[in-house]
């Protein structure tokens, strides 16, 4: 096999067959919810303040729609990373979500059935032959109610091709002046004020028009500290929180220096320090620039699963507590890099009433950094309340 060949033949045997999950050991707690929205920069009182949440239509703290991804290992990409691709690395490529109505509250036990879906190999400028692999996560609660389905896309490519794509001029964080940081804080707070202004009120479908812009959301500059805060909000990264499945990263084709014992249930009982992906294993590229460059990133970079959550939170926050994101498709073009900011915008591109009689708007979302480079694009359908006749 030549160095430019990507052998994906081992994937076929897993398609359509459920794989193991790493189940949570205790019911979801309010502080799990609070930790998550804190890490996702989602300052919505509905998800962390008991007084505000108590006055809502839920009557108590409720998890954001983005929360199910917290309840298993692998950031949702596990069913999109099966089968051995020798000497390969992995990045997140995108997510499609369907939300079915039930919400997550403290006391819930969440289960995830994971099924590999499909894959295709394409030639890319980033890494040459690249495998785009998809897999489904089906999240349900202890009552058997289906909460959401996530179809995750992973990007798997040859390790040597990824490291060769790093541009030396992009390895240093950009510098921000104190004045620029102060201006960024004002822009961040402007979006938070829109959440406060909507409060418990409805965003009526009748009042939304095609062409309406959603408010700008800004967060950053991203840093190793902010990426670490994100990492710590995933339950899998707290020792003992999950019944972790046994996973052989070398057998998946990871290179030895990017394999290790990340989330290994046996090693967690012996030396848990070695199982923390913040320091060892494939995830350490996010927090250590040296290892980031090994997989094709110029410096520390954010998590695809977090980026997907930013999409859901942004849209759900605009919809308000009486609305709901029911479907979204997001494509991740580039991760958030340390030192950069992320600017999120949206536009209403359609209005409709579906076959079930739901009043929907379709929104186009984009994320870009301070240079205008696109990080993520998405389209979503959001259900909004209709004014009574």
Image (cartoon, grey):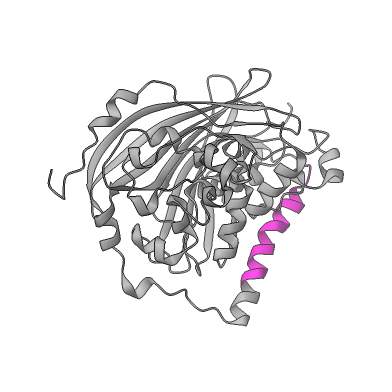
Q: Position of residue 282 (x, y in %)?
A: 43, 50
- Name the spot of residue 292 as percent of width and height, x first: 40, 61
Snapshot quadrant of residue 82? top left
Q: Position of residue 121 (x, y in %)?
A: 24, 39
For image coordinates 12% across by 47% down, the residue present is 2
Task: Give the camera-side residue of 170 and 237.
Answer: 237
Q: Is residue 197 magenta?
A: yes
Residue drawn at 16 percent across, 44 percent down: 5
Q: Quadrant of the C terminus?
A: top right
Span colored in magenta:
184-200
Left or right position of 378 against 382: left
User: Which one is in front, 276 or 314?
Assistant: 276
- Residue 359 appears anywhere in the view: yes
Q: Residue at image x 87%, y 45%?
A: 51
Query: Does the rendering let one see residue 209?
Result: no
Q: Which of these two is toward me, 267 or 128?
A: 267
Residue 283 shown left or right of residue 251 in the figure: right
Give the quarter of the image for residue 320. Answer: top right
Question: Which residue occupies 75% across, 44% down?
Answer: 31
Magenta segment: does it hold 346? no
- Where's residue 226, x and y in %? 59, 61
Q: Considering only vertical position in the picture, is 179 above or below 361?
A: below
Q: How many marks?
A: 0
In the rendered view, would you say 89 is above or below 149? below
| Main SS category, magenta section | helix
Residue farthest to the left, as pictured: 2
Image quadrant where one finds the N terminus? top left
> Quick one: 288 or 112, which is closer to the camera?
288
């Amino acid at each position: 096999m030549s160095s430019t060949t990507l052998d994906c033949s081992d994937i076929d045997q897993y398609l359509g067959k459920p794989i193991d999950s790493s189940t949570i050991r205790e019911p979801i707690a309010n502080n799990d919810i609070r930790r998550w929205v804190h890490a996702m920069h989602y300052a919505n009182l509905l998800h962390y303040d008991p007084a505000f949440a108590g006055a809502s239509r839920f009557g108590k703290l409720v998890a954001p729609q983005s929360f199910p991804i917290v309840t298993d290992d692998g950031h949702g990409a596990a069913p999109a990373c099966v089968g051995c691709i020798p000497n390969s690395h992995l990045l997140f490529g995108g997510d499609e979500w369907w939300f079915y109505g039930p919400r997550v509250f403290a006391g819930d036990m969440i289960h995830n059935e994971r099924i590999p879906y499909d894959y295709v190999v394409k030639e890319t400028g980033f890494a040459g032959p690249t495998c785009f692999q998809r897999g489904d996560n089906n999240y349900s609660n202890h009552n058997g109610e289906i909460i959401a389905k996530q179809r995750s896309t992973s990007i798997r490519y040859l390790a040597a091709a990824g490291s060769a794509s790093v541009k030396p001029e992009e390895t240093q964080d950009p510098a921000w002046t104190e004045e620029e940081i102060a201006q960024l804080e004002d822009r961040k707070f402007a979006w938070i004020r829109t959440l406060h202004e909507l409060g418990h009120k409805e965003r009526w479908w009748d009042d939304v028009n095609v062409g309406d812009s959603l408010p700008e959301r800004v967060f950053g500059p991203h840093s190793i500290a902010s990426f670490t805060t994100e990492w710590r909000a995933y339950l899998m990264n707290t020792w003992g929180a999950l019944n972790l499945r046994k996973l052989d990263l070398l057998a998946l084709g990871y290179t030895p220096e990017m394999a290790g014992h990340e989330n290994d249930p046996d090693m967690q009982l012996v030396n848990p320090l070695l199982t923390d992906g913040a320091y060892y294993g494939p995830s350490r590229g996010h927090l250590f620039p040296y290892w980031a460059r090994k997989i094709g990133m110029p410096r520390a970079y954010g998590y695809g699963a977090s980026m997907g959550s930013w999409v859901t939170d942004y849209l759900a926050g605009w919809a308000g507590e009486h609305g709901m994101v029911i479907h979204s498709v997001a494509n991740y073009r580039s991760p958030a890099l340390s030192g950069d900011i992320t600017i999120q915008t949206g536009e209403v591109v359609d209005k409709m009433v579906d076959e079930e009689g739901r009043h929907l708007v379709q929104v186009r979302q984009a994320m870009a950094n301070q240079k205008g480079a696109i990080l993520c694009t998405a389209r979503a359908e959001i259900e909004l309340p209709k004014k009574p006749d």
